[in-house]
Structure formats: C-alpha cells, structure tokens
Amino acid sequence: MTSRSSSSSNAKTLLIWLGGAVVVIGLVALVVGGNSTSAGDDHPDLQGAPIVSGDSLPQFQSGQNDPAVGSLVPEVTGVDFDGNPVNIEHNGKAKMIVFLAHWCSFCQAEVPEVTAWLAANQVPDNVEFISVATSVDRLAVNFPPSDWLERENWPVPVILDSTGSEAYVAYGAGGFPFWAMVGPDGTLLARASGAGQVNLNDWTTILSAF
C-alpha cells in the first residue's frame, strides 16, 4: 500500500509539474508573439507626423483642365527617415513634388528612372525637388520604404507622411507616383499621376524660367 501511494503521489506531482511547464511555455510564446507584433507596429517608418497647413487641393482626376491649377498648395512641415527636417513651404522657390508608395509597382519603376535622370542632369538652383513617402503599410510588399529608397540610392529629400497619408490627401491623392509642379509663389502649375507621365526635362525648363 505504501509503495502504490508513493507512486501515485509521484505521478500526480509529475503531471502538475508538466502542466505548469506547458502553461509557462504558452505564456512565453504569447509574450514573444505580442512583442513581435508590437515591434512591427512601432517601426520608425510608421511614425510620420507631418504638420499640413492650408487648404487641401481637390482630388486629382486628370491633368487636363485640372481645377486645382492656380490654387495655393498646402505647406507641409515634416522630417525624413532619420528625423531631419524636410519641408514644403512657400519660400519663393519653385518645386517638383512626388508622392511615392513602397508597395506600388509603378513607383518602383519610376524611382530608378528619376534617380538616373538626376545623375545626368541638374535641378535648377531656383527649384526644389521633394519627395513624400506615403501610404506606408508594414504588411505590404517592399516594406520598409526607408530600406527601399536607400537601395535605390534615392537622392531626393523625403518627407515621411502620417499613417493617415495626410500630406498625400491634402495634395489630391491621385494614384502613384503622384506629381505636383509648384510655382515660386506657391501656386499649383500642374499635377500628374503614373509612371512615365512627367518629363523632367520639360518641367525643369518651365520652372527655371521663373
């Protein structure tokens, strides 16, 4: 009787220990999994918080008879991927602005083309060329945009847009890549959407004349 009682007691102890171990392992897995998700949500490329001021432009439909032409464009105060200030402001300089999404195949085609153009040409001194990384999605392909643009040796200053794409929406949210040409007085001269839709030779010639 004593031997059976001892064996039964030992078996119960072992089962309790194993059950506790399973619970602990499950809790560790839960914590690790939760931290992994949190780390993804906290990626720096998801933390853009630009300040957009001024009236938003109407949504872009077509470059032909665009009703936004002649309107004062919104100003954007933001930072790049490293926290350095990059702004779109009414400072007396003409501007070329391009909005890029890391998951957009048209943007992935446009970026190396623009990079090659910039290597062979010079933007006029009175013209600023600014890009905006927008519509960032950590679950989409080619995330994060900072790595993508670094791989492409992208030479254009970048503003990191908010999770709600506030800057992009303020300019009319017209597909990707989305371009805006702005005069030195801050008024919109043209908008365009899609890869290969902007002739940078033409745009810089127009803007350099101001």
Image (cartoon, rainbow, N blue to C red):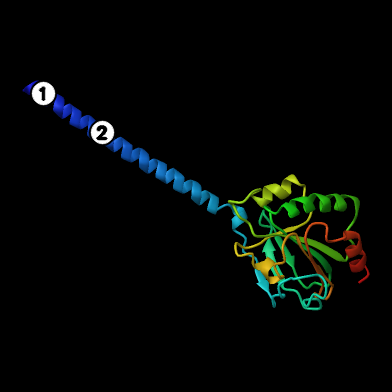
Residue at image position (72%, 52%) is 105
* Residue 197 lies in quadrant: bottom right
Residue in the image at 66% along x and 57% along y: 83
Q: Residue at x 59, y 58 (%)?
A: 47
How far across and how far down the image is residue 126, in percent?
Answer: 88, 66
Pinpoint residue 185: horizontal percent, then vertical percent: 83, 76
Instruction: Select label 2 or label 1 by which is in front.
Output: 1
Q: Classify residue 162 as left or right of residue 178.
A: left
**Rendered image: mark on residue 111:** none
Task: Provide the residue designation for mark 1.
Answer: 4
Query: Seen in the image, is 111 located left or right of residue 142?
Result: right
Q: The C terminus is located in which quarter?
A: bottom right
Mark 2 belongs to which amino acid?
Trp
Amino acid carrying label 1: it is Arg
Callout 1: 10 Å neighbours few (<14), some, many (20+)?
Answer: few
Q: Residues within 10 Å of mark 2 (few under 14, many from 20)?
A: few
**Secondary structure found at label 1:** helix
Residue 151 in view here: yes
Q: Position of residue 28 (x, y in %)?
A: 39, 41
31 relative to 77, above or below: above
**Quarter where residue 71 is shown:** bottom right
Check disc 2 and report the residue beneath it.
Answer: 17
How far across and how far down the image is residue 131, in percent?
75, 60
Residue 168 vs residue 147, the one in the foreground? 168
